[in-house]
Each structure stands twice: as C-alpha cells, then as structure tokens.
Image: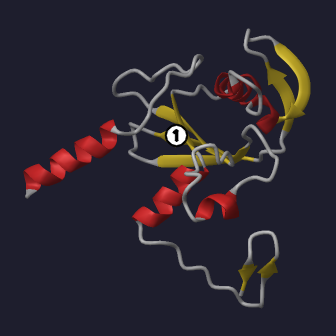
Amino acid sequence: LLLAALAWGFYRYASISSVDVPGVTPAATGQSANWLLVGTDTRDELNPDAADAERFAQQGVVGKRADTIMVVRVNQATGGIDMLSIPRDLWVPLVQLDGSVGNNGRINGSFNVESGGQQRLVGTIEQNLGIEINHYVEVNFVGFQELVNAIGGVEICVDAPTRDRASGLNI
C-alpha cells in the first residue's frame, strides 16, 4: 500500500507541467529560498465540452493577468516560512525582457504581455523590492479548480442574500 501511494505521488508530481523562467536563480542546496507564487485568471485550458466552460469563459478577454502575486520565503535556518503578498496594482517601474527598466505601471502589467511575462514579473520584483526569486509557481483558473476539487471543495458562508447575474450566482 505504501509503495502504491509513493508511486501515485511520484506520478502526480511528474505530471505537473514545468517550464524554465529566465531570471530565476535556484537557491544553493541547504540555503533559504524565495518562491514566487502567481495566480492567473487565464481560462485557456478550459475544456470547451465541459459544462463549466461557457459559465467560466472570459467574454472577449484574451491574455492573462496576475491576480495574485506572493513571495514565500522558506528559511532553512529556522524552518520557518514567511509570506509577502504583493498588491497587483502596486505602481512600480516595469522591467523589460532585456533587463532594462521601462515605464512605470502596475506590477501585474509586467506579467500581462504577449511573451516573457513571467520573466518580466520576476525581474520587476527583484529590481523594485530587492528580493531574489529562486522558484516560480503559477496556478491558472483550471489549476485552481482542480486544487479546490482535490480538497473536497470549499464551504463559503454568506451572511446576506447575494446575486451575480453574469455568473448565475443566486444565494
């Protein structure tokens, strides 16, 4: 049973897609590391045949935006974890793909570009906040759905009647 659980865990870990993000420098073994966690609103991976595809589709919106930006520091010396949430509308000089500093804009604007958004976001955070990024994790809308489903859903308690015509929510 233990062997089957380990095999399943390794299989699930190996199925996570991975890309190299230029500008991310892995921490040396045994050193503290900073993880950049990005939550995007892209729905590019929605299954068009699924019941939720039309309900969750972005009406005419293309690209992706960084709705959540967090730096998580894993401190090897203390075993502690520190988290910094970066407001997506933080106004900073945006770093370009070549490393030069461009115009000022919202920090999530460095992410929302045709290509190289991950690299630009890493560079913008490192340049403006002085935080070296060692690892990068990105979760899109479908990934978030899968995380919620994996833990059996999330109960939300609403104190007052709530309605949203666009999504069909009516509590």
Residue that numbered label 1 is attached to: 73
The C terminus lies in quadrant: bottom right
Residue occupying the point 82% across, 47% down: 60
**Which quarter of the image is occupied by the N terminus?**
bottom left
Q: Position of residue 77 (x, y in %)?
A: 39, 37
Furthest residue in direction bottom, as rendered: 160
Give x and y (percent) for residue 119.
65, 22
Q: Residue 84: give x, y in percent of width and height.
A: 64, 46
Residue at (60% x, 79% y) in the render? 156
* Residue under the image location 74 percent in, 9 percent down: 98
Kind of residue sitting beneath label 1: Arg
**As rendered, which of 109 and 145 lies closer to the eye?**
145
Q: Is residue 65 above or below residue 166?
A: above
Q: Is residue 160 left or right of residue 145?
A: right
Residue 70 position by quadrant:
top right
> Is the image coloured rainbow, by chain, by secondary structure, or in one colour?
secondary structure
Q: Is residue 150 left or right of residue 145?
A: left
Task: Give the quadrant of residue 106.
Answer: top right
Eyeballing the image, is 47 above or below 66? below
Numbered disc 1: secondary structure: strand
How many badges with numbers are in the image? 1
Q: 46 or 110: which is nearer to us?
A: 46
The percent position of residue 151, horizontal first and vertical second, equals 41, 67
Mark 1 is surrounded, within 10 Å at the Cα level, by few (under 14), some (14 to 19) or many (20 or more) other residues, namely some
Residue located 67% across and 45% down the image: 42
